[in-house]
Image (tube, rainbow, N blue to C red):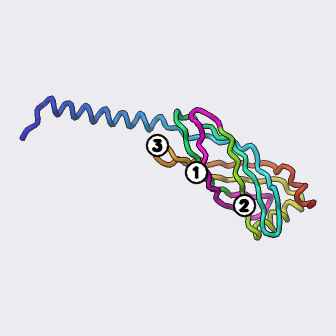
Amino acid sequence: MTRSRPTLLAAALLLALLASGCALFTKGLAKPTVDVRGVAVASVTFTGAEGQLDLDITNPNGFGVPLSGIDWELTIGGARAVSGRVELSQTIPAKGVAPVVATLRIGATEAVGVASELASGVRTYQLSARLHFTSPLGPITVDVAHQGDLADAAALVRR
């Protein structure tokens, strides 16, 4: 059975439109950007330490992008890097900026190293993080590298 020329032409046009439509749709997807507002160590105890990560996330897309989690690694002074994962469920609005606050939990062993660095006067930190988003086209990851000084760290070692 042979297909008619108009049917083949219509099928070819449909395939071309679908292919160009998919290319346009994926080309329009942009990664969110992340600004680190601050990192703080809120408490250091014998059972561990707790900190806070403050971010501003900008979504340049025309649709909301859900943030599902953050993998993080934090080094304070010369202390061995501590790491963890924070599960989140926050949608960054379309063409908007959203503040995100994540709690960083540090185990007892790593907290000893952090406390030792803070007690010696060290206030510098390095943060490496990978943010995980979902989108209509699949997962998106954004890597962040940031360094700075811890706010109010001196008060923690005086307790």
Tag shown at residue 68: 1
Q: Position of residue 98 (x, y in %)?
A: 66, 39
Q: Residue at x 84, y 54 (%)?
A: 123
Which numbered disc, 1 or 2, marks the residue that appears first in the sequence?
A: 1
Left or right of 6 in this view: 38: right
Q: Secondary structure at mark 2?
A: strand
Q: Nearer the viewer, residue 132 or 68?
A: 68
The image shows residue 78, relative to residue 90, as above or below, that is: below
**Which residue is farthest right?**
158
Which numbered disc, 2 or 3, marks the residue that appears first in the sequence?
A: 2
Residue for badge 2: 105
Q: Is residue 87 magenta?
A: yes
Magenta stretch bounds: 73-97
Q: Residue at x 78, y 48 (%)?
A: 148
Q: Residue at x 55, y 47 (%)?
A: 133
Left or right of 100 in this view: 47: right
**Which residue is farthest front?**
89
Alpha carbon of mark 1 to alpha carbon of mark 3: how far? Answer: 14 Å
Circles 2, 3 touching at the beta carbon (< 8 Å): no
**Looking at numbered disc 1 in the image, what kind of residue is underneath it?**
Ser
